[in-house]
Image: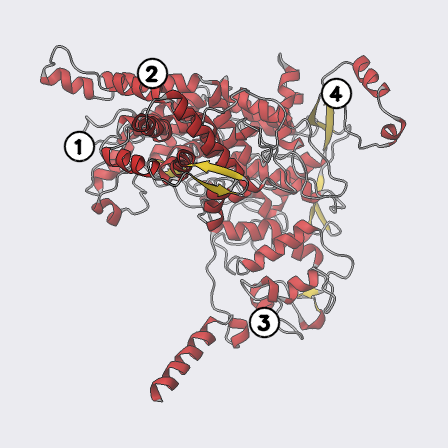
Amino acid sequence: MIRSWLLFALLLIVAWGALPAALRGDEAAPAEFSAEQIEFFEKSVRPVLVERCHQCHAASKQEGELRLDSREAILAGGDSGPAAIPGEPEKSLLIAAIHFADDGPQMPPKGKLDGDKIAALTRWVKLGLPWPQAAPERPPTAPASTTFHIRPADRQFWSLVPVRMPELPPVSDPSWPQTNVDRFILAKLEASGRQPAPPADPRALIRRLSFDLTGLPPTPEEVDAFVLAFSPSPTPPLSHSQQAERESGRGGERGKAIAALVDKLLDSPHYGERMARLWLDVARYGEDQAHTFQARQYPQGFRYRDWVVAAFNRDLPYDDFLRQQIAADLLDGPDKTERLAALGFFACGPVYYGDKNGMDQVADRIDTLTRGMLGLTVACARCHDHKFDPISTVDYYALAGIFASTDYVELPLVSAAEIEASEKTLSEQERKNKNRPKKYPFLHAIADQPTPRNMRVHLRGNAETLGEEAPRRFVEVLAGDSPQPFTRGSGRQELAEAIASPDNPLTPRVLVNRLWQQHFGRGLVRTASNFGILGERPTHPEMLDYLAAKFVASGWSIKALQREIVLSATYQQSAFADEASRETDPENLLVGRMNRRRLEVEAWRDALLAVTGRLDDRIGGPPVDLADANNRRRTLYAKISRHELDPLLRLFDFPDPNITSDQRAVTTVPLQQLFVLNSDFMTAAAQALAGRLQGETADDASRIQRAYELLYSRPASEREVAIGREFLSATDESVETKKVRLTRWERYAQALLAANEFMYVD
């Protein structure tokens, strides 16, 4: 009996402890939030609270005894109880009110919020009500002054100091480095008493390089040729010194084979496709809107996507790459029509139709520009001076004036006569539709308004409460002590020059970090789009500056930068982690080994098509529907919908195209394996692979070997061959999957395609 009561009491204690603090009557427990969560609050939540809630629920007025201007006040609530329960939006009064629930208050009273704002507030509650600490790291401006002051210490923050070429650090083992990158890595490893991992097996290395630089797997023939060139049989026998030179990465056969492979991959037209997807995440590329009403479509948006592919393939200098996306229409020089497609960076962005004064769309453009190109969260200064970084509301509205002076336009790619001829083919009903799709090619672009205008600061983000005028200009902390106003049109050209300037310390650092993240799975700065106070510090700041300085000195060549990275001994390490490194550096911050990485959904799907012999590798063109069973094009060319993202992309962690994204999430959920086991796409892939193997080889043992070479870039072991032959020789002929009957070979092929080894790269 006593044991039963003790057990019951223990259960009560556990249950009581699991309740939210607001329901237990406790004071709100201090909450720790990530930089990304605080950034989300400042960008997407605080502006909504300020603009739509604080008039009735803040310090000056508390209807229903409710304040919504602090986390503590929200948790304390008003007459009806806590306004929100962290982590439980479905039980939160605030969320019920903004959804206009029938059995409660409907807020705000002047009209329901737009869907994106409702989604943002709901997500905010789900995350646990992220809110910055009451005492910001950056001291506030003196109360007697309304001017924002940039302190000398602000300019000395690591990401804002000028990029300088550092001295190369000394190392104890000068034979290991293959590029100067390795000296920075090895110096830190040696200082911690550790050594780098051994070199990767050549088969693992070519697979790693192929996926990293083209997003496609190598063919068995390419693997065999690389292995042969990597380590040919020495004839006649070599001396010890000759053997050492042959095995070295700098002058021997190994180094020559790797360099030749890298050059081949960088010259491949598929290189641009691989790199484009990295940038399109940053550019939040999409071809429609999240709304279903009055939605602007981008049927020609693929022209921007194809411009990005072509720019990477021809190694367009990165400074020009940025200039053209900001102000291609304002730049001089040849090929202007071709450059205009670059304006899709802004033109193909989200549209906020409930946004009466256009400030939400302006905020999106500022956020995409500054986070994507500068690694700064300038959008957090929309309602107040940035809580942490030296960015003022005047900075924000100075940039806002540039975009408020810029309009969305559609530029025809045909003559006036061809446009007129196209119009004549329209029916009378089509002519009445102002939003009718054009039947001729055009570009989604932007253009300056005839009369540019400055904006006045919106006090606390409220468009109806205006402060001082903010002349159009660059962010002060980057522009110098006396930033000059922009005077040429909207100011986009001057903005482009400021961002792409070799004196801008952020632009090269941010790009170098993004490329490092692409190749290692983690950036030198983990917060790839936040180089501010709330972002993480670089693990190797000197190496970051070395690469940034060399990047600018090379003429902003992305291919040259990548070549230096992938030819390093650091990149060519094995992914094997011994017990000591797992214990002392579990996150591999010292980069003492390679990180095992899961393929993004695009590379995984493309690899499935490639190994089964079905990939259509044509470059460019209009988008295609991933749901089409006959779609064999690379996943880059899939239609990207903001309103209804394709289920395959959504299931395998494709980023939200409504907002700029700095890295892919990696989730493992049961639905992913259910897709692999049951989807029509995987069934078709298994059938195609089985058919290919049976057509290329004569017996089961040879087919098993060929399958392993195609899928994993290695031969099958004797045990793997034996397991495969045992399965294939069993008497069960087939199994029914939906309406398709799979033979044992097809089932075996599906199992190989579903294996982790196919989805991961060492």
Task: First in sequence, mark 1 or 4: give its number.
Answer: 1
> How far across and down, in percent of the image, does residue 451 sit?
77, 30
Callout 3 amino acid: Ala
Q: Is 439 on the left or on the right of 643, as rendered?
A: right
* Residue, far bottom: 1
Residue highlighted by disc 2: 260
Give me the C-alpha separation between circle 3 and circle 4: 59 Å
Give me the C-alpha separation between circle 2 and circle 3: 65 Å
Q: Residues within 10 Å of mark 1 (few under 14, many from 20)?
A: few
Residue 76's tag is 3
Callout 4 amino acid: Tyr
Q: Residues within 10 Å of mark 2 (few under 14, many from 20)?
A: few
Residue highlighted by disc 4: 440
Callout 2 amino acid: Ala
Residue 83 figure quarter: bottom right
Q: Residues within 10 Å of mark 4 (few under 14, many from 20)?
A: some
Residue 86 figure quarter: bottom right
Contact (CB < 8 A) between labels 1 and 4?
Answer: no
